Amino acid sequence: MKIDILTLFPEIFHTIFNWSIIGRAVEKKLVRLNCINIRDFSEDKHKRVDDYPFGGGPGMVMKPEPIAKAIESVKESESKVIYLSPKGKVYNQKMANKLAREKHLILLSGHYEGIDNRIVEHYIDEEISIGDYVLTGGEIPSLVLLDSIIRLIPGVLGSEDSFIEDSHYNGLLEHPQYTRPRDFNGYMVPSVLLSGNHKEIEKWRLYESLKITYLNRRDLLKKKDLTDEEKDMLKEIYKELEIK
Ligand code: 4FV
C-alpha cells in the first residue's frame, strides 16, 4: 500500500514515519509513506495557501489551487482521496478494515477554518471525521488513520491474530489483560488465567468482554447479533451486576 499525506506541516509526519510499528512497516517495505507540502504548489509570489472567506466571517480558508495541484501530483487510477474534517463520516474500526485493503490513499489535512468547498465537491472521494470535536488541523486525524490502517496490513503486527482480539474487532470491547507479577501489591491475577485451561480462559475472556462492553458501551451490544452463548452469559452478567 502507498499513502500520500498532503499537509502544510510535513515535519509532524517525519517523526511518525520512523516511529515504532509504523517505522518497521516502512523498513519492511510493507507500506510506502510520502509527505507533500501543499505550500510547494502555491504559485502565489508569497506562496500564500489561504485567503479570506467569501461572504465574510472569522478566520481564513485554504485556497483551492495549491490543494488541487498537490492532489494531481500524486493521484493515480486506484487512488482514494480522503479529506479529514469534522463534517465527515465518524471513523471506526470497520472503516479502518476497509481502507486497509486500498492500494493507494491520499490523506488531505486541512487547516484554518477549512478548505475551499470546490475541492470537497470535485477532488475528494471520502470525508472522514475522527470525532465530534474541533482540532487546529487535520494532521492528527491523518495520523489516526495512518496508525489504525498500517497496523492492519498483513505482516506489520507480529502475528495477525494480535488484532483479532482487539476491542471493536469483533464488535465488543477487549477483555481485561494481566501480566507478571501474579501478586501486585496484594492485587492478584484472576486464577483462571493461571489455570492453563484454555477453554475456561476463553469463556472467562468472552464473559469479561461482554461485561465491560455492557458497562462502557451498551450501544455496541445493541449493534451486535449475539450468539446464544453470549446471550446466556449476559443473563449471568445481569445477575452479577444485580440488574433486573
Ligand atoms: C477534524 C476532526 C477537525 C477543523 C478545522 C481542522 C479541524 C481545522 N478533522 N476529524 N474532528 N479538523 O477537527 O477530522 O482546519
Image: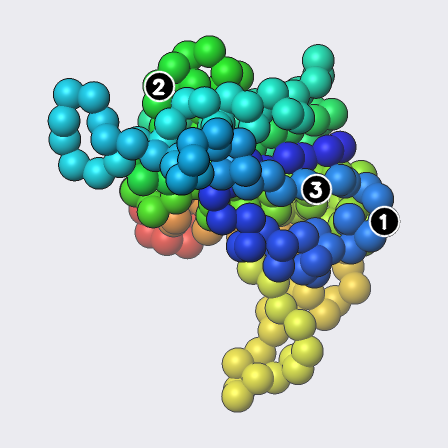
In the image, 213: left or right of 3? left
Q: Which residue shows up at 60% across the image and 39% down it?
A: 36
Which sits in the foreground, 11 or 232? 11
Q: Which residue shows up at 66% across the image and 72% down it?
A: 179
Count neighbours of disc 3 (C-alpha within 10 A) and say few if under 14, some if 14 to 19, many if 20 or more: some
Question: How far apart in space, not on screen, are marks 1 and 2 (Cα)?
Answer: 38 Å
**Above or below 77: residue 242:** below
Helix, strand or loop for disc 1: loop
For label 3, the residue is: 33
Q: Which mark is residue 28?
A: 1
Question: How far apart in space, not on screen, are marks 3 and 1 (Cα)?
Answer: 12 Å
Q: Are marks 2 and 3 in contact (CB under 8 Å)?
A: no
In the image, 137: left or right of 94? left
**Above or below 200: residue 36:** above
For label 2, the residue is: 117
Q: Residue furthest bottom?
A: 185
Q: Position of residue 39 (x, y in %)?
A: 49, 38
In the image, 173: left or right of 30? left
Which quadrant holds the C terminus?
Answer: top left
Helix, strand or loop for disc 2: helix
Quarter of the image for residue 132 reads top left
Count neighbours of disc 2 (C-alpha within 10 A) and say few if under 14, some if 14 to 19, many if 20 or more: some
